[in-house]
Image: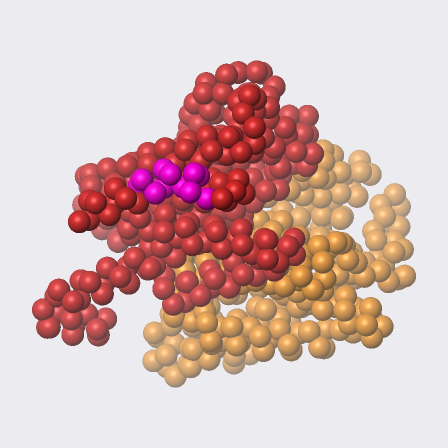
């Protein structure tokens, strides 16, 4: 039964672009799947090791500009540009990670905010390379396709990326490495004293989670065709990955995906309903505050606990209620 | 040489404002272990209030402080007592981040995204010391910051409330045992922190044009300052602020604005690599 319903969901996801009446909804679908892939990737670090990064948009932006510049300025074929820029960003993330994971908790959050702010400054300041606030134009690698067909193609590319990230998260969470990351999340000092190589584990998690976000950035550059530093290197954009993961449940494989399915369409709806005012920022902010206050473990955790309690014997449930 | 002196002087003046704002951030961190990402957003809220009171009622920006400061103190106490208390440090960052977005969105909706500024005729002139020109608005800002900081230190060191607050920072349980109402003290501490944002906002409105999204630039700078100074150390934050203000001023006149701001992040990175607890910080920084 579970398998059948899962297969149906996958089939529905694959067929989505043909099921909706217009290309705008395909476009919104691409954005949603992109967010889902990024939030899941964020969750490799945030969910497993417990290190909350508000700066993952830095890797998105670097991946996007890397791919975009290689294609636009050097005329590289897009798959090569995508691969090289993603590898470069992962390497960069590993180097930054060595410094960043030396601090924990709130200090780590500060460092990630600083990272994205610094990248934003560089991208805006280095006009000769990035074009600055005049957006960088990336020629479409699929010039033969019209706008709608491009959306259709990138919908499936992002879907493939999402599948890859989900697989990666699942494999890591079941591995010895994943247990090590969880040990870091629960009690880093104890984990270290038990022989978990915490620093190396954290740096690898940081780089892996940056890698998939950079891939998403590169695909975004090829799809959208125009890069603005203010958007790609925005802290708000990085925060949306966090919001999605928290809302869905960051201890769960499908938590960030679920969060993205709620937050991304809601964001698009806000944009249409309320136009270009800034009130959508307030909506995001209020949602984040509510999630942190009332359901920091996310939707899936609630469901999981409810199911779990139903099956658990009476005694356990009572002790659970006290906690 | 004149250029360097000019940069040094301007950096010092700006550093004063940074010090005031960073002191507020350190205070929150000390009492609550909260990294208050929304501090700059409230700073700009205060700047916009000053702007409204100035354009609406013709008040001098400096005369708005008796209104904004108590208002922000009350708001701070309320925020701490109602929503921030009881959250762990990580969640409180995300919560205050949500608050920052909320404030920015409201400011953008009410005042639109365009630049606003308050200009007073006394603020447009400048004082000339030989070849170095110091704008009066920056001098006023500096002195307000210095006076507020001095008052803050006096409050923390001399008063009964200050002793209770420092006791709460150093050891909450022990403080409770000797009869300090730590919850209430933490609330007031948060109020004092937000009140410094009100003072800073007034000063900011006087010295620079602002728009709703400008608080992001400040978050990065202020966060860098408190990490370099050592999380939780009010004095360390103030010293690091002056240091980074001067470095920024010097790079600004010799290279350009981008590199001047990047200096904050360079110092942050170097501090993390060589001395993660900060220049003046203690054991706190590692754990939070």
Instruction: Write the residue at 84% across / 60% down.
Output: B119
The span picked out in magenta is A10-20
What chain is colored orange?
Answer: B
Residue B124 % position (x, y): 87, 56
Say which colour chain A has: red
Instruction: Write the residue at 69% across / 74% down.
Output: B68
Instruction: Write the residue at 85% across / 48% down.
Output: B133
Instruction: Write the residue at 53% across / 76% down.
Output: B77
Q: Is residue A11 magenta?
A: yes
Residue B162 % position (x, y): 52, 75
**Can residue A132 be seen here?**
no
* Res B109 → quadrant: bottom right
Does residue A16 appear left or right of residue B3 in this picture? left
Q: Is residue B133 magenta?
A: no
* Res A39 → quadrant: top left
**Can residue B135 be seen here?**
yes
Q: Name the residue nearer the viewer: A141 or A60.
A: A141
Residue A116 % position (x, y): 53, 42
Does residue A276 appear left or right of residue B265 in this picture? right
Does residue A7 appear left or right of residue B155 in this picture? left
Residue B231 % position (x, y): 48, 56
Callout count: 0
Q: Quadrant of the N terminus of chain B?
A: top right
Q: Quadrant of the C terminus of chain B?
A: bottom left
Q: Name the residue nearer the viewer: A120 or A142.
A: A142
Q: Name the residue nearer the viewer: B174 or A37.
A: A37
Q: Name the residue nearer the viewer: A149 or B226.
A: A149
């Amino acid at each position: 039964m579970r398998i059948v319903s899962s297969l149906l969901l996958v089939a529905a996801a694959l067929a989505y672009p043909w099921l909706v009446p217009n290309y705008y909804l395909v476009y919104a679908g691409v954005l949603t799947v992109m967010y889902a892939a990024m939030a899941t990737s964020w969750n490799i670090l945030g969910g497993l090791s417990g290190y909350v990064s508000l700066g993952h948009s830095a890797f998105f932006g670097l991946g996007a500009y890397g791919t975009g510049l290689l294609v636009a300025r050097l005329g590289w074929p897009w798959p090569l540009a995508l691969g090289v820029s993603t590898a470069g960003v992962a390497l960069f993330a590993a180097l930054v990670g060595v410094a960043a994971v030396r601090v924990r908790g709130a200090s780590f959050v500060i460092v990630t905010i600083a990272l994205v702010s610094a990248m934003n400054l560089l991208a805006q300041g280095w006009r000769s390379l990035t074009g600055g606030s005049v957006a960088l134009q990336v020629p479409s690698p699929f010039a033969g396709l019209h706008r709608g067909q491009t959306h259709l193609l990138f919908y499936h590319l992002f879907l493939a990326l999402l599948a890859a990230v989900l697989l990666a998260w699942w494999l890591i969470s079941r591995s010895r490495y994943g247990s090590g990351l969880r040990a870091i999340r629960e009690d880093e000092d104890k984990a270290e004293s038990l022989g978990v190589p915490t620093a190396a584990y954290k740096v690898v998690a940081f780089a892996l989670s940056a890698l998939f976000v950079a891939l998403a950035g590169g695909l975004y550059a090829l799809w959208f065709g125009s890069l603005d530093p203010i958007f790609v290197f925005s802290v708000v954009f990085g925060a949306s990955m966090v919001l999605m993961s928290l809302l869905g449940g960051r201890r769960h494989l499908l938590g960030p995906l679920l969060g993205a399915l709620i937050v991304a369409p809601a964001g698009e709806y806000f944009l249409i309903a309320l136009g270009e005012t800034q009130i959508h920022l307030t909506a995001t902010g209020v949602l984040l505050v509510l999630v942190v206050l009332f359901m920091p473990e996310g939707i899936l955790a609630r469901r999981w606990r409810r199911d779990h309690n139903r099956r658990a014997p009476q005694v356990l449930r009572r002790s659970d209620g006290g906690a | 040489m004149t250029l360097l002196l000019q940069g040094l002087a301007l950096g010092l003046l700006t550093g004063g404002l940074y010090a005031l704002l960073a002191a507020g951030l350190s205070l929150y961190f000390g009492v609550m272990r909260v990294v208050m990402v929304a501090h700059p957003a409230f700073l700009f809220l205060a700047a916009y209030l000053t702007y409204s009171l100035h354009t609406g009622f013709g008040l001098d920006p400096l005369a708005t402080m008796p209104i904004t400061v108590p208002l922000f103190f009350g708001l701070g106490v309320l925020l701490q007592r109602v929503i921030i208390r009881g959250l762990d440090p990580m969640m409180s960052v995300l919560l205050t981040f949500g608050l920052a977005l909320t404030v920015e969105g409201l400011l953008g909706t009410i005042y639109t995204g365009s630049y606003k500024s308050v200009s007073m005729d006394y603020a447009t002139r400048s004082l000339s010391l030989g070849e170095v020109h110091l704008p009066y608005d920056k001098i006023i800002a500096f002195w307000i910051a210095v006076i507020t900081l001095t008052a803050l230190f006096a409050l923390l060191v001399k008063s009964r409330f200050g002793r209770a607050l420092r006791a709460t920072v150093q050891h909450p349980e022990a403080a409770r045992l000797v009869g300090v109402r730590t919850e209430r003290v933490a609330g007031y501490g948060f109020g004092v922190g937000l009140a410094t944002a009100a003072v800073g906002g007034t000063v900011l409105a006087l010295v620079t044009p602002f728009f709703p999204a400008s608080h992001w630039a400040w978050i990065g700078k202020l966060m860098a300052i408190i990490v370099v100074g050592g999380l939780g150390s009010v004095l360390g934050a103030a010293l690091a602020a002056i240091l980074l203000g001067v470095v920024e001023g010097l790079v600004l006149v010799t290279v350009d604005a981008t590199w001047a701001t990047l200096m904050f992040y360079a110092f942050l990175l170097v501090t993390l690599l060589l001395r993660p607890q900060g220049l003046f910080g203690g054991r706190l920084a590692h754990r939070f």
